Amino acid sequence: MLSKVKILTQFMSMNIFVVLLTSCGGGSSSGTVVEEPIVLEPTPVVVSASFTSTHFSGSENCAACHNGITNVNAEDVSIESDWSTSMMANATRDPFWQAKVASEISRNPHLKEVIDDKCSRCHAPMANVEAKFLSADVELFDNGFLSTENRFFNLSNDGVSCTVCHQIEDDGNLGTEQGFSGNFSIVDLGTSTERTAFGQYQNPAINPMLMTTGFRPTYAEHISTSEVCATCHNLKTPFVDSLGQIASTTPDSEFPEQMIYSEWENSIYATSANQKSCQDCHMPKTDGVRIANRPSNLAPRNNFSRHTLIGANTTMLDILASNKTELRVSANGFEDAIEKTRTMLKSSAQIEVVNQDLTGEELTVQIRINNNTGHKLPGGYPSRRVYLHFVVNDELGNVIFESGKTNLDGSIVGADGDMDLTTFEPHYEEITQQDQVQIYGTVMLNTDNEVSYTLLRAASYAKDNRLTPVGFDKYAVTDDIRVAGAAFADVNFNLGSDLITYKINVGTVNSLNYTVELKYQTLAYGFVKDLFLDNSNPIVAKFEAMYNSASIRSETIAVIEGSI
């Protein structure tokens, strides 16, 4: 009788091997070993962020040392706690993302594999990398990454976690077309011991982290650069024609879904005199931080980058906080994250009154909007929009003109695209009617030049009048980041600002007061209206219920008041 150690299965939550002893009988003169197959029923994964895998380690493992830290002002700057309420931490829990991916698959089911891979690469990067390394299926729904019975569930559920970003290597493709659209490279792929973890500080204490986690802290300049962020935030997607056939023939010809890095590259903030990286704004620096709570003799470091990763998405943060159980959210502190997000939004732009005049019965007010960010405003995914709410009151407080009022459902009064998904509100140089609204955003066109909200049908932009960053010259940029539609012909729309004139008949009045608000929405009404056409899908229906119950439809970036 021969006995032999045989690896039967993998314990999913820890991704370590369970070794069992099995007997293999052999009776032939040649000594051939005959092994009986053993069939194991799938076992649900223990939901945990303390997993380890060949290449990654869960955020709870990092939290053990990198939470419980403070800055020079005794403010809690714990890394995992700050990160846990970010959209990056919740990249796969995001119910809008889940619903949108499900919708895209239902509309082009023959491209399911392409969609699963493209969307998991940046939203579930650990699961995507590990599955490909093991030649396993890359799938999101059903028995895919989002299922607790999938062996990569915990890697997926941990979102864009610590050991993803800190293992992106400078392979020569960062900041180039070859490195965009999720084409990041994880250092030492295939190595399971003494993995490299890149950090912002020179001369790190190596042994405590190496002995505890198996990760070797290593200084790397590239980890603090915008090029690392560009790997996912410059993203181009393939598109199909009306027959469902892929019409984008090369990666370069794909649809520029978001090009934040390229927009930044064409701003003043990419120049040496005004250098500001993505991290400078989204990971604000602070001083006097012992970057780990052990060992106790670590010296405080300055210019520590907080891991708040604040963006502009209060709507989704509110939905995550209100549906924690259903979305498997364990983090606390979303209220604080929402307030920090509002603070960032209020710093993103400003309004100034350039001129005002009341001649006879005609009121003229010229408004300039200045973009303070390092990319277009709004930035990122095409569902977002910024718009002007302009209200004129007479001396008794009666409203005599209002453009850009937000309805309770998130739609904007007078916005053509909110009422009819086949059309859109144009860019204006002058507004004279209440049903005209200045909306800064994008409108996608399919291959038949029809308005589309389906990403896989998006071939070009009919409109892109998002406010450009300072230094961005619309006449000198590539097509991937061009200003599209009527805004391109508007000579007052360029280089980080837009000048718009309100010219209104106000009748006979003695005095007037007016208010101008710059508003922001993560989810333009047309996007959710189109998405909910697929609410027969339970994933879409789940998000529709959450959205309808949410309390945040829009945010105010800036307000200015005047009288005449």
Image (cartoon, grey):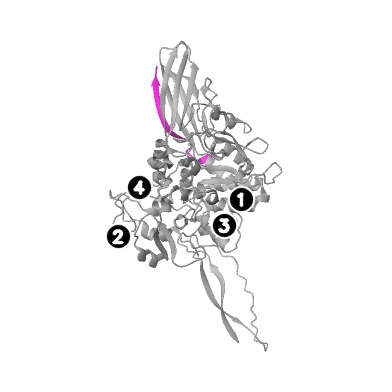
Marks 3,1: beta carbons within 8 A: no
| Dot 1 amino acid type | Ile
| Dot 3 amino acid type | Ser
Give whichever of 26, 32 is nearer the camera. Answer: 32
Q: Mark 2 points at which residue?
A: 298
- Tell me the distance, in whole angstroms, between the alpha carbons under discs 4 and 2: 19 Å
- Tell me the distance, in whole angstroms, between the alpha carbons under discs 3 and 4: 37 Å
Residue 212, quarter of picture: bottom left
> Between tags 4 and 1, which lies in front?
4
| Dot 2 amino acid type | Leu
Residue 328 is situated, as x and y percent measured from the top left of the image, at 49, 53
For marks 4 and 1, the one nearer the N-term is 1
- Residue 174 against residue 521 in the figure, above or below: below
Range drawn in magenta: 548-564
Q: Name the residue under label 3.
A: 147
Label 3 SS: loop
Label 4 SS: strand
Residue 14 is situated, as x and y percent measured from the top left of the image, at 49, 65
